[in-house]
Image: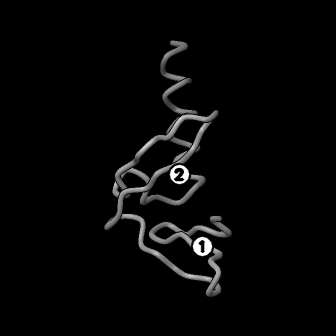
Amino acid sequence: MIMDETKSMFRINTENGMKSIAKSSNQWKFSIENKDVIVNGSRISKRSFDRIGAKLWLKILELK
C-alpha cells in the first residue's frame, strides 16, 4: 500500500517495513474500479498538487 509520495518517490508499506521506490524508473500497476491500469512512472513523476493543477487547467481551457 502506498503510504506517502514525493515528486520522485513512493513510500510503500511492505511486510519488511517501509520502502522508498523511485517513480520514474518503474512502471506502476493500479487497480481502479476493478480494472488494472499500468502507468509509466515518468508520467507521474510530479508533485501530487502539480498533477491536480494540470488537470484543473485542462478543464478550464476546455470551457473556453
- Circle 1 — which element? strand
59, above or below 4, in the image: above
| The image quarter in which residue 26 lies | bottom left
Q: Which residue is mark 2?
A: 50
- Dot 1 or dot 2: first in sequence order is 1
Mark 1 and mark 2: span between their CA atoms?
A: 21 Å
Q: How many residues crowd around disc 2 within 10 Å: few (fewer than 14), some, or many (20 or more)?
A: few
Residue located farthest toward the top when viewing the structure as drawn = 64
Pinpoint residue 32: horizontal percent, then vertical percent: 60, 38
- Point 49% across, 28% down: residue: 58
Pinpoint residue 62: horizontal percent, then vertical percent: 49, 16
Amino acid type at image mark 2: Asp
Pinpoint residue 61: horizontal percent, then vertical percent: 48, 21
Whether residue 43 sits left or right of residue 16 in the image: it is left
Residue 55 or 17: which is nearer the viewer?
Answer: 17
- Point 49% across, 66% down: residue: 7
Whether residue 58 sits left or right of residue 2 in the image: it is left
Amino acid type at image mark 1: Ile
Whether residue 5 sits left or right of residue 40 in the image: it is right
Residue located farthest toward the bottom when viewing the structure as drawn = 16
- Circle 2 — which element? helix
Residue 10 or 1: which is nearer the viewer?
Answer: 1
Q: Which residue is mark 1?
A: 12
Q: How many marks?
A: 2
